[in-house]
Each structure stands twice: as C-alpha cells, then as structure tokens.
Image (tube, rainbow, N blue to C red):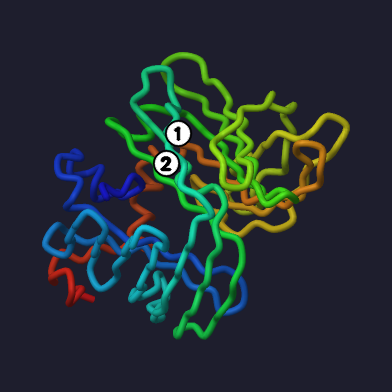
C-alpha cells in the first residue's frame, strides 16, 4: 500500500499511495517464482479485515490470516496461484520507532506463527514456521535511511529473536535486539557484537549481522541479490544457541540511483486498469 520500492510511486511524487499497491510473492528454490505487479486504486478494495489488490486478496478472521494469491511472475510471466494460511501463536501490541524523528515504525505483529502453503502453480505444498510484521511511515525510506539490516531467527523454546540495525540520515541509529518468548511480548536484550558477512555476489550489497561473542555468523544461502537489496539465510548464534536466521540488507543510497529505478519495471510491472475482483491481469 504505497509500495515503498515502486519507481512509479516515486515518479508520481508519492501523492496517492492507494494508487500504487502490490501483492509481493517470492517463492525460492526449484521452480521458484517472483511477482510484484503494481496496481492502481481502482483495483484496490479495503475493509477492516479484508484487503483486495487486483486478483489477489487477504483476509483476517481473528485467528488466521488467509492469503489467496493469483499473480503472474516477472520478468518471466509464469502463473503464481495458491493459498497461504498463517496462524499466529499470539499477536503483539507494540510498534517500534525506527528513526530518531519517529517517522518510520515497525510492528512485529506475529513474531512466531504456524504457516501452511498450498500452491497450485507451481505445485508446492509445505507447513512450517511463519512470521508477520508491518512497516509504515510518513516519508520515503530513502529520505529516512542510508541502510538497514534485519534478521529473524526461531529459537529452541518456540520463541524468536529479531535484530534491526538502522543507519538513519538524521541523527544516530539505535539497534533493536528483541527476544519474543512463545506467546509473549518483546523482551529487549543487549545487542551482540556486529559480525561482517560477505557482500552479495552479483551486486556487491554490503551485509552484516550481530552474533554472540566468540561465535561466527555465515551465509548459508543468498535468495535475493538485487542492485539495492539482499535477502539471505544465515547460520549464526544468538542468546546462547545456534540459530538459522532470515536476513535482509537494504542500501537506500543504491536505490536512489536513476539507473536502478529504471531497471525496476522489469520485475515490477504496473497495471492501471481492471477492478479488484477481475484483477486487470
């Protein structure tokens, strides 16, 4: 909603966020597909517990978030169709400011959840651990930050650890190191020392994380390597135990470059027609 990485939204002067909405779907591994087709406000419908963007929709019934996906991949136009059901063990109540001026906020809605994925195209099905959060702000990300890194790791007791390191453009950054016990609210813990990771192979995006003193963090797999963003799976050590973490690094200075924004439409096409149920796809 007001797609933060949309070049169309940036070129429009960010006047109308509801005219720049997308359902982002990323499937990794064999047969993996990726979609982030942007749609205008005529294809968006919002209710308190339901959101429709083109042919895809999500619904919250108070216990389960159900996401019905009907998209087409980019740059290869392969169909992506299926359903995701996410059931939080608990919903947290606290959102956190990410910058000194508090123009950007992050809410870890469900730090630990059960997730079921049933895809018809491609044919993939699995059940496992899930996560649900939300970010919002009153200015663009590139105006607020130079870089940030984020990671989430499930813990042996069924809880989760989340790390957030920001480099704001206005004032100093304060790292967030949070432990979420099963079914509980955030518990801050002392941020471990920083651990440098190798840059992404293709676009050389800088990566780092935090790791318990005396232990080593390593990249098990890179799943996104783009001109401004890297997403990885890490083997690391937090709160006294070995963990496997999902990790992201964002370079907003890279994102601001004109050449990068001109490249984005190849993976983020825009459709300006079609109603919310028909999808315009």
Q: Is residue 164 above or below residue 63?
A: above
Please provide percent x and percent y for residue 69: 36, 73
Q: Residue furthest right?
A: 214
Please provide percent x and percent y for residue 228: 49, 45
Numbered disc 2: secondary structure:
helix
Q: Is residue 30 above or below residue 200?
A: below
Write down the quadrant of residue 162 in the picture: top right
**Considering depth in this image, is 182 or 170 the residue closer to the camera?**
182
Please provide percent x and percent y for residue 125: 56, 80
Q: CA distance from mark 1 to mark 2?
A: 5 Å
* Residue 253, numbered circle: 1
Q: Residue furthest top?
A: 171
Write down the quadrant of residue 43 in the picture: bottom left
Q: Residue at x 32, y 64 (%)?
A: 58
* Residue 255, numbered circle: 2
Please provide percent x and percent y for residue 144: 38, 27
Quadrant housing the C terminus: bottom left
């Amino acid at each position: 909603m007001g797609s933060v990485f949309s070049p169309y939204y940036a070129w429009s002067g960010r006047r109308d966020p509801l005219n720049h909405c997308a359902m982002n779907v990323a499937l990794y591994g064999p047969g993996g597909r990726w979609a982030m087709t942007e749609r205008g406000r005529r294809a968006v419908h919002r209710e308190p517990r339901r959101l429709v963007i083109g042919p895809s929709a999500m619904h919250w019934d108070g216990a389960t978030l159900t996401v019905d996906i009907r998209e087409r991949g980019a740059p290869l136009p392969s169909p992506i169709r299926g359903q995701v059901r996410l059931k939080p063990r608990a919903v947290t109540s606290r959102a956190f400011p990410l910058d000194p001026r508090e123009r950007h906020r992050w809410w870890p809605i469900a730090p630990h959840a059960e997730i079921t994925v049933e895809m018809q195209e491609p044919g993939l099905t699995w059940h496992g651990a899930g996560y649900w959060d939300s970010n919002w702000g009153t200015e663009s990300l590139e105006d607020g930050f130079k870089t940030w890194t984020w990671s989430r790791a499930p813990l042996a007791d069924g809880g989760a650890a989340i790390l957030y390191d920001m480099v704001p453009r206005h004032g100093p950054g304060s790292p967030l190191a949070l432990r979420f016990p099963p079914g509980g609210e955030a518990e801050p813990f002392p941020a471990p020392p920083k651990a440098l990771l190798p840059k992404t192979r293709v676009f050389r995006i800088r990566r780092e994380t935090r790791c318990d003193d005396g232990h080593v963090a390593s990249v098990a797999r890179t799943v996104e390597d783009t001109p401004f963003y890297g997403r990885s799976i890490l083997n690391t050590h937090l709160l006294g135990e070995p963990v496997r973490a999902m990790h992201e690094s964002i370079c907003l200075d890279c994102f601001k470059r004109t050449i990068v924004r001109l490249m984005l439409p190849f993976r983020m096409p825009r459709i300006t027609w079609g109603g919310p149920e028909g999808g315009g796809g």
